[in-house]
Amino acid sequence: DAGITQSPRHKVTETGTPVTLRCHQTENHRYMYWYRQDPGHGLRLIHYSYGVKDTDKGEVSDGYSVSRSKTEDFLLTLESATSSQTSVYFCAISEGQGYGYTFGSGTRLTVV
Amino acid sequence: SQKIEQNSEALNIQEGKTATLTCNYTNYSPAYLQWYRQDPGRGPVFLLLIRENEKEKRKERLKVTFDTTLKQSLFHITASQPADSATYLCALEGGNTGKLIFGQGTTLQVKP
């Protein structure tokens, strides 16, 4: 969507390797979120950020870390990828409480 | 634990009819409730937001109701069209971080 881009769009990686997904926004929104979407589970929050260097865990944060050194970039890192982390990952941005999210187009990650 | 339930069965309706989707929740007191549309292979798109002190919200052919006593929201699409076919997600927001908890979504199929 306009104002938010995710990279890469697709990635295949091997078990045990580190992987970093990038989310970039041009909207200057304070809040950024990483979700994963799996059949039967819907969208689940991994980590979120409420400002530069301010991040917190979501409901499925084990095995993931994030960093936000600039307002526009929010990185999601899988320290050592496992097959259970095969999923579609979505980044979203928001102006805060009471505002809708704008989602990126997603990254389809396959861990083999 | 907090739980959001949307009908997992697909909703099939005839073009021109009104589609009604249901979102029920438990163990939660959301300040806001949001509805999103998601097409296959795409990120969710924000449609409507309704606040806890609002009973109803409209936008063009869309109408959302929010009953905090029943812990339920209804999402209506009037004069439905085949282009309305998609998965619709309900999301609840509470607290001051803008975090959303999503339901698993209901797939709507509008037949010509």
Image (spheres, rainbow, N blue to C red):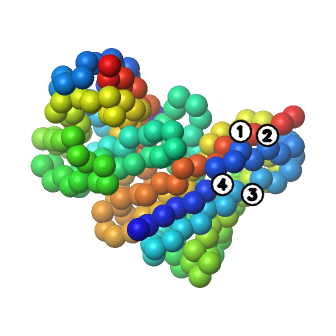
* Tag 2: amino acid: Val
* Tag 1: amino acid: Ser
Image vertical order of residue B10 relative to residue B99, above or below: above
Tell me how far mark 1 sits from mark 4, CA to CA. Answer: 15 Å
Front label number (3 vs 4) = 4
Residue A19 in sight in this render? no
Of the pair A15 and B81, the residue shown nearer to us: A15
Q: Which residue is mark 2?
A: B110
Q: Dot 2, crowdedness within 10 Å: few (<14), some or many (≥20)?
A: many
Q: Earlier in the sequence, mark 1 or mark 2?
A: 1
Q: Tags 1 and 2 in contact by the CB under 8 Å rule?
A: yes
Tell me how far mark 1 sits from mark 2, CA to CA. Answer: 6 Å
Tell me how far mark 3 sits from mark 4, CA to CA. Answer: 11 Å
Q: Which residue is mark 1?
A: B85
Q: Earlier in the sequence, mark 1 or mark 3?
A: 3
The residue that appears at 52% across and 54% down in the rendered structure is B103
Please tell me whether mark 2 sits on a helix, a strand or a loop: strand
Instruction: Indicate the position of residue A57 as horizontal and vertical percent values.
Output: 23, 54
